[in-house]
Image (cartoon, rainbow, N blue to C red):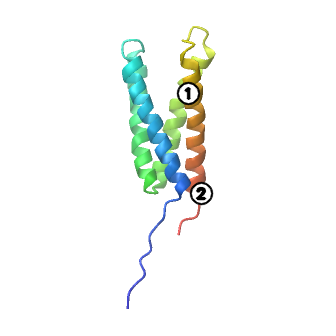
Amino acid sequence: MTTPVTTRTVPSTLRVGAVLAALLALVDIIGTAVFGLGTAPVEVIVITTLLAVATLVGAAFAWRGARWGVWLAIVTRAIASLSVIPIIIVPDAPKDAIPMSIVTLVLTVVAIVLLIAGSRVRRA
């Protein structure tokens, strides 16, 4: 007699949200390294990098279905997205950065929505 093995399946919406959050975190790290070094204050570079690393950790665990990983990715992406607002609002901000900032903000909202929707799906 064999015992059925129960596996917990992770919803695809959750996985897509986790991948998108991880990609956005990598964009933050690369963007900070390429554009921020030398121009941004050290505090901004450190905070952005810490939030991005925390997002990567959260996304990795969210991929496996850990609820705390989902929430870590959501919270860190939401906080990281606040850095985009000054670029859009401040008149002295570089105008070339506005379109990319808006795209990043929209993709962050999409990632958060996917993570929330995927975490609400009942698992088998």
Q: Amino acid at mark 1?
A: Leu
Rendering coords of residue 81 (x, y %): 54, 30
User: Would residue 76 appear left or right of 120 to someone viewing this image?
Assistant: left
* Image quadrant in which you'd find residue 44: top left
Asked whether the viewer can see residue 52, the reply is: yes
Q: Residue at x 47, y 35 (%)?
A: 24
Number of residues whose C-alpha sits closer than 10 Å to that of mark 1, classed few (under 14), some (14–19) or many (20 or more): few
Residue 110, position as x, y percentages in the image: 59, 41
Q: Which residue is mark 1?
A: 82
Task: Name the residue type under label 2.
Answer: Arg
Instruction: Return the x and y of residue 100 as percentages of the image width and height.
Output: 55, 24
Q: Residue at x 48, y 47 (%)?
A: 18
Report the side of 56 relative to 87 (left or right).
left
Number of marks: 2
Q: Is residue 100 above or below residue 66?
A: above
Kindly identify the residue that appears in the image at 38 percent across and 36 percent down: 53
**In this picture, is 8 found above or below 81?**
below
Q: Tell me the distance, in whole angstroms, between the alpha carbons under discs 1 and 2.
A: 25 Å
Name the residue tied to disc 2: 120
Q: In the rendered image, which quarter contains the N terminus?
A: bottom left
Q: Residue furthest bottom?
A: 1
Q: Label 2's element? A: helix
